[in-house]
Image (cartoon, helix red, strand yellow):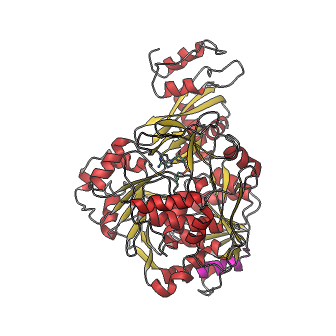
Amino acid sequence: MSQKIQSLSGYYHEYQKSIHQPEQFWSRIAQGFHWKKPWDNVLSWDFEGPEIKWFENAKLNITENIFERYLFTHGDKTAIIWEPNEPNEAERRISYSELYEMTCQFSNALESQGIQKGDRVIIYMPMIPEAAVAMLACARVGAVHSVVFAGFSSTALADRIKDCKAKMVLTADGNFRGTKNIPVKAVVDEALAQTQTVEKVIVYQRTQTAVEMKSGRDLWWHEVIANEPKANTAATLDAEDLLFILYTSGSTGKPKGVVHTTAGYMVYTHYSFTNVFQYSQGDVYWCTADVGWITGHSYIVYGPLLAGATTVMFEGVPTYPDPGRFWAIVDKYQVNQFYTAPTAIRALQAYGLEPLAPYSLDSLKVIGSVGEPINEEAWHWYHDHIGKGKCPLVDTWWQTETGGIMISPLAGITPNKPAHASLPLPGIQPLIVDAEGNELKGNNVEGNLCIKFPWPSMLRTTYGDHKRCKETYFSTYPGMYFTGDGAKRDHDGYLRILGRVDDVINVSGHRMGTAEVENAINEHPKVVESAVVGFPHNIKGQGIYAYVICDLEGRTEEGLIKEIKETVRKIIGPIATPDEMQIVPGLPKTRSGKIMRRILRKVASKELSNMGDTSTLLNPEVVDQIIKGAGLAP
Ligand code: WT7
């Protein structure tokens, strides 16, 4: 398949074709895949519905495009290199043939345990190859996987199980993360005490942690696969059959299940992986994300494996046993493409250059960034000290909803500009609009980022609630997909993403809805009301700042803050724990009762100039009280 763009003029040429004749463009790209039956129609769409169908009526199985397509040519090639948490534990190298056998065997086990096409299976697992096997085995039988990041709490897990009415949970006994051994199975047990739909739990033995196995419900992974054959025929799926659901936070309500379907996701993750990273056969590619996020789905598992690549999977954390761990792994496996998040870069940058000294990093050809805007300082540090000034740095902008990378340099092909995601990939038609939805054409414009034409890996719906999908993404600016991000097109025509314009904060590259954190805080019986905003944080990008009105009776402020933080950890998980919490006598409100978040954001960022007019507030006096309470002089 020659889908790889080789030059800047090639990029412009492909981009033009993709805009003027999108159907011909994508049909040519899709031809390289293995279809059980070809499509009748490349695309039908309506952003009003929304209703989007790619490769209509085609039949396929995505795992055949990973395995059967390649087994004859590179069955012996390494598919996954797994690096354990402990540097002195042996790594695992799994070839395409072995991964095929593991996938078939486990998919046979899924069927033996009653899983059928369309059933929802929750995956709550550590970063081990079996997490990828679990996803692929679901895809092989046509079950819909929903991976839940193993750092989420039992309540968050239970919410997701209930929302998708999952029939099965795949998990492990424990999860090694740095010095910790997190008892994941115990979290699953707690979650299942709150839900009704799960019939079976399959537990992979990773840490040898003692776990309770509920008879009739819980089964050991090694036992369920023991007698299953290591081959089978992949289920025949429709192009638009669900491949997976992935929950993500928005500005309102509970996290929503973003739905991705089979064919379009397959075509686009492969295409974007190949072009952005300029992957060549024989390269070793490493993305440091967790499979619990979309980055792990698209660029640890599906994209690389569809491309027949060697993908590294790391169980641990960047600072264990020391802050040189990433670089040790790069040298150990001679990693050629390295993809991580700005928050990790900033955290490692804080240790200085010493941790880098023992490592050459010579194997690196491409470095990448994802998850939040990368500030110029971090960009330069990454580019100069990790990429040694010779590696293109791809700043990749995309979202859970987009399924794949949308705006990014193509490594070494299109220009690099610090802190700019730069240009759209072929097939992607971004535009910047003003508040009324008018397109802002030309350079030097700033506004809200929308996409005006469908792309193959876009979300199709939000699970069980199509109306919510329409309202969230297709109603703000009718006829367009609204990203929730602000963006600027600079004087050179490159796009720079400015961050969220809605009530979503991006904490270490993880999306948190302020409303979601507020709801969790409000669960504490002493809390009367709360308001959560983001503030600039040196390492995390944004931190969480919570203002809380509460009844202090019988407690110290310190004690109560600790309790409320614990409540948030229990309801969502440690990633949602507020960095700052201030007990306040009131919240600034408009006469209609709306919280003036702008003021709260200013105080949280310690930026008291331009507070604007506060005299129209219902309770203007509260502003000074909040400023004083924050330890700032009004
Ligand atoms: C939000 C999506 C895409 C996988 C990881 C996050 C922000 C993501 C960039 C970037 C500036 C970025 C946006 C976006 N974002 N990448 N390169 N530059 N901002 O996925 O949890 O769905 O979050 O992350 O604000 O809307 P997600």
Where is residue 324 drawn, in percent x and y? 31, 56
Q: Mostly what secondary structure, the magenta segment?
A: helix
Residue toward you, 331 or 365:
365
Residue toward you, 184 or 441:
441
Whether residue 271 is situated above or below residue 49 in the rendered picture: below
Magenta extent: 104-116
Quadrant location of residue 293? bottom right
Whether residue 235 is situated above or below residue 179 in the rendered picture: below
Regarding residue 407, the answer to whether it shows in the image is: yes
Whether residue 103 is situated above or below residue 461 in the rendered picture: below
Does 311 lie within the magenta span? no
Quadrant location of residue 321? bottom left
Where is residue 80 drawn, in percent x and y? 45, 73
Residue toward you, 515 or 468:
468
Where is residue 485 drawn, in percent x and y? 55, 42
The residue under the point 36% across, 42% down is 376
Relative to 446, 338 lies left or right: left
Does 110 lie within the magenta span? yes
Regarding residue 126, the answer to whether it shows in the image is: no
Whether residue 557 is situated above or below residue 40 in the rendered picture: above
> For the image shown, how many numbered marks are present on the structure?
0
Relative to 42, 442 lies left or right: left
Where is residue 522 drawn, in percent x and y? 66, 35
Residue toward you, 619 or 394:
394
